[in-house]
Image (tube, rainbow, N blue to C red):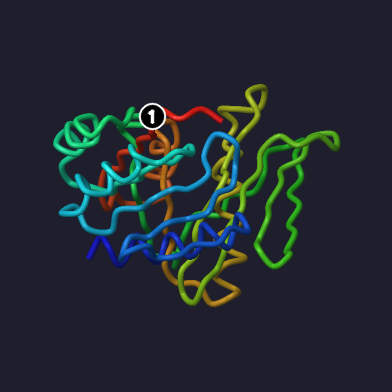
């Protein structure tokens, strides 16, 4: 079940970021093509984690491994045993039925800008300057949120909720029914407040190769 949802999430992620992916010997690999992360391997079956970790550890270029899991402690032990460095041990894989998603209006002094190309992009502006932003890619009936952020000077004003609500409203217009996202530790509180539920924990590790 988790594996299917991970594959659906990945299709939205690569759409949002303009990336490509492939299967190597049955393993899902995304070509991120950044200096510090050339490829990201995504585990869709916890039984393959140890083998995947060894592949990533042996790579000659900067490679990362993301593992959605219900046993994060065990996964951390497995990837470290293979020689990987755990970069983010406590992220969260989340989803939500998009019907009825909260969509608050921006507070006074802020305006919302929506762009499509075709990924949905939302910016919240204050005096013409970006205060918060986010992306959402719709693939079939799934909507994947990506790069949700609020500038430090504008935090604690509900702008994250404004961004998410606007993205979801636009995604529903495009036929989306289910939302999926990978959340940082800092973002979980926001998403839970908006009714998103945890699917699993998420462990992210990398090899020791420098760019």
Estimate the x, y position of residue 69 in percent, counting from the top left: 22, 47
Is 118 or 203 nearer to us in this picture? 203
Q: Is residue 57 left or right of residue 13?
A: left
Farthest residue, direction top: 153
Is 210 or 67 nearer to us in this picture? 210
Estimate the x, y position of residue 83 in percent, counting from the top left: 27, 30
Q: Residue 211 falls in which quadrant of the image?
A: top right
Estimate the x, y position of residue 25 in percent, counting from the top left: 31, 64
Estimate the x, y position of residue 54 in percent, counting from the top left: 26, 42
Q: Is residue 159 left or right of residue 82?
A: right
Quick check: 105 above or below 13? above
Quick check: 82 above or below 141? above
Q: Residue at x 57, y 67 (%)?
A: 171
Q: Residue at x 57, y 43 (%)?
A: 148
Q: Residue at x 41, y 67 (%)?
A: 178
Q: Residue at x 15, y 42 (%)?
A: 71
Quick check: 112 above or below 25? above
Which secondary structure lies at badge 1? strand
Is 191 or 69 nearer to us in this picture? 69
Q: Residues within 10 Å of mark 1 (few under 14, many from 20)?
A: some
Q: Which residue is mark 1?
A: 87
Farthest residue, direction right: 128
For the N terminus, the image quarter is bottom left
Q: Residue 188 falls in which quadrant of the image?
A: top left
How many marks do you count on the picture?
A: 1
């Amino acid at each position: 079940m988790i594996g299917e949802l991970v594959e659906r999430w990945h299709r939205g992620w690569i759409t949002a970021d303009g990336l490509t992916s492939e299967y190597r010997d049955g393993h899902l690999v995304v070509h991120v093509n950044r200096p510090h992360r050339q490829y990201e391997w995504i585990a869709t079956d916890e039984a393959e984690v140890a083998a995947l970790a060894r592949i990533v550890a042996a790579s000659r270029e900067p490679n990362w491994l993301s593992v959605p899991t219900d046993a994060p402690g065990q996964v951390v032990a497995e990837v470290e045993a293979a020689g990987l460095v755990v970069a983010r041990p406590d992220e969260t894989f989340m989803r939500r039925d998009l019907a009825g998603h909260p969509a608050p209006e921006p507070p006074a002094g802020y305006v919302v800008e929506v762009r499509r190309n075709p990924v949905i992009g939302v910016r919240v502006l204050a005096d013409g300057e970006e205060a918060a932003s986010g992306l959402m890619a719709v693939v079939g009936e799934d909507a994947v949120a990506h790069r949700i952020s609020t500038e430090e000077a504008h935090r604690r004003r509900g702008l994250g909720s404004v961004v998410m609500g606007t993205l979801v409203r636009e995604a529903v217009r495009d036929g989306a029914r289910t939302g999926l996202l990978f959340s940082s530790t800092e973002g979980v509180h926001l998403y839970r407040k908006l009714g998103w539920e945890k699917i699993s924990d998420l462990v992210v590790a990398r090899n020791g190769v420098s760019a």
